[in-house]
Image (tube, grey):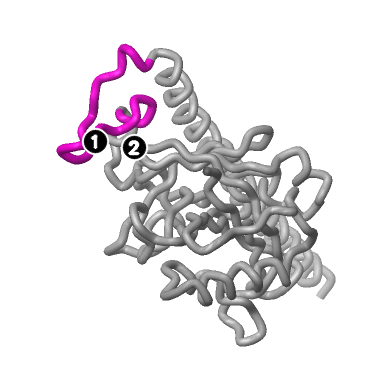
Amino acid sequence: MKDYKKFICLTAAVCLLGAAAFCGYHIYDHYAHEAEQTEAFEEIAAIVEQAQTEDSNAPEVPLTEEENVLAEYGGLFLKNTDMVGWLSIAGTTVNYPVMQTPNAPNYYLKRNFDKEYSDLGTPYIQENCDLASSDNLVIYGHHIKGGKMFGALEDYKSQSFYEEHKTIQFDTLTQRGEYEIVAVFKTVAYSSQGFRYYDFVDAENEDEFNAYIEKCKELALYETGVNAEYGDRLITLSTCEYSAQNGRLVVVAKKAV
């Protein structure tokens, strides 16, 4: 009987050690993958930065008969034509290509720039947004710990951080754009209790546009002093927020004139 109990204890210990090793491996694998993908995005950003300083040597890449892709984005666009722009916020880790796949919503939720599986995904624009004409471009990104991807937006919960980072740079492939932050707020998705900010893409009239801005201001964590008027172009950055189930942290900004 004593030997049997020893056998059971030994078996349980081996199982626990095996489970611990299995969990440890997957944790290591997750962080190794995250580090690898972070480095890949840094390399992409370095390509853009280099092209910005050597744009005279960059080949012209036509987008339409009338327009060429901006020099710093031409090489990346040739690698992946799902790229529609570039998003950056000075003083943060946000410095990423932005994708859009109208016929495959959320395609880049779990894919990197090279269309391979990635926990980090790649920032992407909602499928029904038109970069040339929509009043509001809704851009999604994962909330990754350590300020990676749109995890960097977490700092915008603090007004003091906002005061030092009031603008967002969002370039399309053919035009550079600076955006002034109008409001930062929290809400919940997929609930009648939440604000369906992602439904607002094209305003049918001035009243609808104003209603969107008023709701953003109502939910705002603090006052930015920046407002938006009908005719302004907006971007809305969206990421997960973990203080509530299906929580979202949202940053709304208008294009500077």
Q: Read off the magenta span.
A: 55-74
- Side of 77 relative to 52 (left or right): left
Quadrant in the rendering for residue 211: bottom right
- Side of 119 relative to 58 (left or right): right
Q: How many marks?
A: 2
Quadrant in the rendering for residue 7: bottom right
| x and y, in percent, of residue 215 in the image | 65, 73
Give me the disc on residue 67.
Answer: 1
- Side of 73 relative to 183 (left or right): left
Q: Is residue 102 above or below residue 33?
A: below
Residue occupying the point 31% across, 47% down: 82
Tell me if label 2 and label 1 are in contact, CB under 8 Å: yes
- Looking at the rendered structure, the secondary structure element under dot 2 is loop
Residue occupying the point 57% across, 54% down: 142
Residue occupying the point 64% across, 79% down: 194
Give me the disc on residue 95.
Answer: none
Q: Return the disc, 2 or 1, that comes first in the chain's sequence.
A: 1
Q: Is residue 80 above or below residue 118?
A: above
| x and y, in percent, of residue 27 in the image | 64, 49
Residue type at tag 1: Glu
Label 1 neighbourhood size at 10 Å, few (<14), some (14-19), many (20+)?
Answer: few
- Looking at the rendered structure, the secondary structure element under dot 1 is loop
| x and y, in percent, of residue 169 in the image | 54, 39
Residue type at tag 2: Thr
Asked whether 101 or 34 is in front, the reply is: 101
Q: Is residue 141 above or below residue 192?
A: above
- In the rendered image, which residue does mark 2 sit on? 174
| x and y, in percent, of residue 15 in the image | 68, 62
Looking at the rendered image, the quarter that the N terminus falls into is: bottom right
Residue occupying the point 68% across, 49% down: 145
Label 2 neighbourhood size at 10 Å, few (<14), some (14-19), many (20+)?
Answer: some
